[in-house]
Amino acid sequence: MPLRPPSPTAGRESEHWTFVTHKKTSKTCKNRRAATRPGALSRLPHPHPPPHQPLRSPPAIAAEYRRIRSTWDSSSSPCCAALRVLAAKSAAAAARCAPVSRAVCLGIGSFDPPDGGWEARRRTYLQLIAFLVMVDELEKHMGRTIPCIFQEPVFTSADRDFIAGLGHHVVDSPEACDRVTPDTFLFGIHLYRPIYAMALRNHLPALFVGTGWDVWDQFSLSESPDLLHLEEMERTYAKAAFPQDSSSTAFSSTSVYWRSAASAPAQPATSLTDQTSKHHQHDTLPPETKAESVT
Ligand SMILES: C[S@@+](CC[C@H](N)C(=O)[O-])C[C@H]1O[C@@H](n2cnc3c(N)ncnc32)[C@H](O)[C@@H]1O
């Protein structure tokens, strides 16, 4: 099982992305420290590459999506089966506090990356499928349709058309972050730290999928309080490791957090200076999610 998320050597991605590194063997990376500071995204010279001209058509992307989904979203995929069970469990618990009425998906990458890289493209498909599988379970539980909003600055026009063709909305940053409310399902895997900070700054969501608190470099966290809202979820929400897909790094270092009866009632994220200690209840985390840190 991969210990690391996307490889820093994966072509052009490494010029723009920051990556999870092993907490105990953190390597120096020029952009790493900059990207972990509050407001750092705006200071980075190229926080993400601009969308390029699409090479693939929306129907070609849709065909590839259906092919990958039919293989992955089947009983033969232990990851998908485990995800459905976990999604149903977390949906039921979160719904006891407040119904989930919106789903926000951030930063899944492009279905047509400029270098055509298959690994990155497959991660994008798998993250989309996992997001939609979780939405599917939430909808079953809530008995109603949950609107989905996507935000990814590198989406090409073909990516946007493909997502729109599935019946979902694509918005420009930071609109999706601004639409996170206490009854939102927020999904964003391997994101830059400032994006998590931006998405969590107004409200804690009902259900969150992303890099877990335990994975971040505790030294850099002490330098700035930008992720204290994540720390609040770590203390007050139920949590489980995201099921791993043995064929890819799509879900490495990823956790699922959900508001439960033991959590604080749905309310705006508390002020960064008003942190009170609350108890938490965590499912057991497998070792591979514990030993890494994200930049
Ligand atoms: C390290 S990459 C991870 C991509 C993908 N989730 C994966 O695991 O391979 C971070 C992603 O965040 C996206 N991103 C950057 N700024 C963003 C923003 N303001 N809102 C949403 N996504 C953003 C980047 O374009 C990039 O695709």
Image: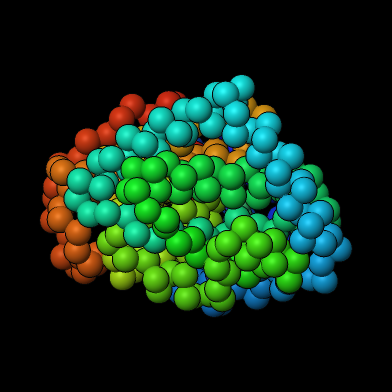
**Which residue appears at 22% of the width and 36% of the height?**
281
Q: Is residue 133 visible?
A: yes
Q: Taking 176 as reference, is 211 above or below it? A: above
Q: Position of residue 4 (x, y in %)?
A: 59, 38
Out of 61 and 152, give the one closest to the viewer: 61
Q: Is residue 255 left or right of residue 191?
A: left
Q: Residue at x 40, y 38 (%)?
A: 87
Q: Quadrant of residue 1?
A: top right
Q: Is residue 34 above or below residue 10?
A: below
Q: Tell me if 13 is positioned left or right of 274 in this view.
A: right
Residue 77: quadrant of the picture: top right
Q: Residue at x 24, y 64 (%)?
A: 269
The percent position of residue 89, horizontal first and vertical second, equals 32, 35
Quadrant position of ligand 1: bottom right
Residue 212 visible somewhere in the drawing: no
The one of 242 and 2 positioned closer to us in this rendering = 242
Picture residue at 54% right of the left edge, 29% below the top: 79
Q: Position of residue 238 (x, y in %)?
A: 27, 40
